Image (cartoon, rainbow, N blue to C red):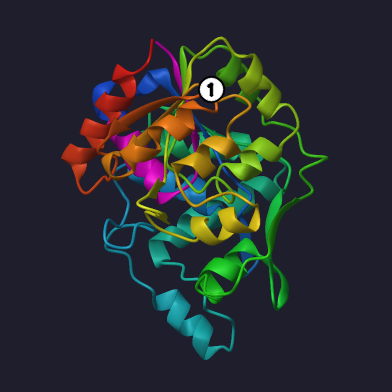
Amino acid sequence: MKYTALAGGTGAAKLLRGLCQVIDPSDLTVIVNTGDDWMVWGLSVSPDLDTVTYTLAGLIDETQGWGIRDDTFRCLAVMATLGRETWFNLGDKDLATHLYRTDRLREGNTLSQVTDEIRRRVGIRSRILPMSDQRVATQVLTPDGWLAFQEFLVREKGRLEVRDVAYERSESARPAPGVVDAISHASAVIVCPSNPISSIGPILAIRGIQDSLAATQAPIVAVSPIVGGAPVSGPAGKMMLAKGLPVSPVGVAQAYEKWLDILVLDRQDSALASEVQSLGIRAVVADTIMRDRQTEVSLVRAVLKVLP
């Protein structure tokens, strides 16, 4: 079987790591959000691409959930001395990835090409695709005005009220090469437990991707990132409310209603299964909190079990 996954950052990376323990990693294609890509000190940073890559390569800093394990931050300290902004933490090893990406992009390569080079060099057998080679920027409307996603999440620590979320330049962006084919030719599509608005939303905003999801013959299963009325992590709750969605698995189902077949929700939310099913989406109850490698694999097995 060939599997295609839609992914954001940390929660997605854990599920994907578990998936690669159960299936042949070469049978997996991951389509990753790039709406929160950011320029830091002139370098092109792709946080979700890097988190997925570092996790599947066994390099991720498990404590932080981002960056490279056992990294140092000497460059960051010197940049602070020089008066540059340092609210976006970049470790010294992590900098090498961004230097390489920026250099290759400046040479005329696409983000897809550079992403594939990086994943091959760190020994990942799964295919990793950015959602688009064109720049799409997730913007968050707060009482202070519109902020780029990283300004909202990292600089402001996600504490501001969210009034709206938009995907700047998504109308003109095209799916990266291979994205539509990966959806169309998959045996199954898995939507990782990522923020429906800021992680999966930008992917869906690219013209043609939702149409591909609606048209594919493959079953599509999503894992809810909302458990017990709150996101497992991050600002998904605020963002869902800003988009008029309830902060529950029902809200996740509504966000994906046009093309989703199956939603896996946590046992804490089992009472909501009938409401999800009223939307024409099959509801499956499982333990969805990934606390360690064992629970990652257990959740993956539960997801694969529901596929026809």
Can residue 146 be seen in this snapshot?
yes
At horizontal 62% and vertical 43% (from top left) the residue drawn is 201
Q: Position of residue 275 (x, y in %)?
A: 47, 34
Q: Nearer the viewer, residue 160 or 61?
A: 160
Residue at x 42%, y 30% (from the top left corner):
274
Expressed as whole percent of the image width and height from the top left, the position of residue 111 reads: 63, 41
Q: Is residue 265 above or below residue 99?
A: above
State the quadrant of the N terminus.
top left
Image quadrant holding the C terminus, namely top left
Please indicate, yes or no, whether residue 191 appears anywhere in the rendered image: no
The span shown in magenta is 1-18
- Report the side of 120 relative to 23 (left or right): right
Camera-side residue of 292 and 58: 292
Q: Position of residue 220 (x, y in %)?
A: 49, 22
| Corner quadrant of residue 207 | top right
Asked if residue 79 lies left or right of residue 12, the reply is right
Residue lying at 58% horizontally and 89% vertically, measured from the top left = 83
Q: Is residue 88 magenta?
A: no
From the viewer's perspective, tell me whether residue 226 is left or right of residue 285: right
Vertical side of 65 occupied by 146: above or below? below
Q: Residue furthest right?
A: 172
Q: Residue furthest left?
A: 294
Q: Is residue 14 magenta?
A: yes
Which residue does the numbered mark 1 point to in the structure image? 280
Residue type at mark 1: give it.
Gly
Q: Position of residue 255 (x, y in %)?
A: 59, 39
252 or 270: nearer the eye? 270
Number of numbered discs: 1
Q: Going 63% across and 50% down the picture, which residue do you hit?
A: 35
Q: Within 10 angstroms of label 1, few (less than 14), some, or many (20 or more) residues?
A: some
Q: Secondary structure at mark 1?
A: loop
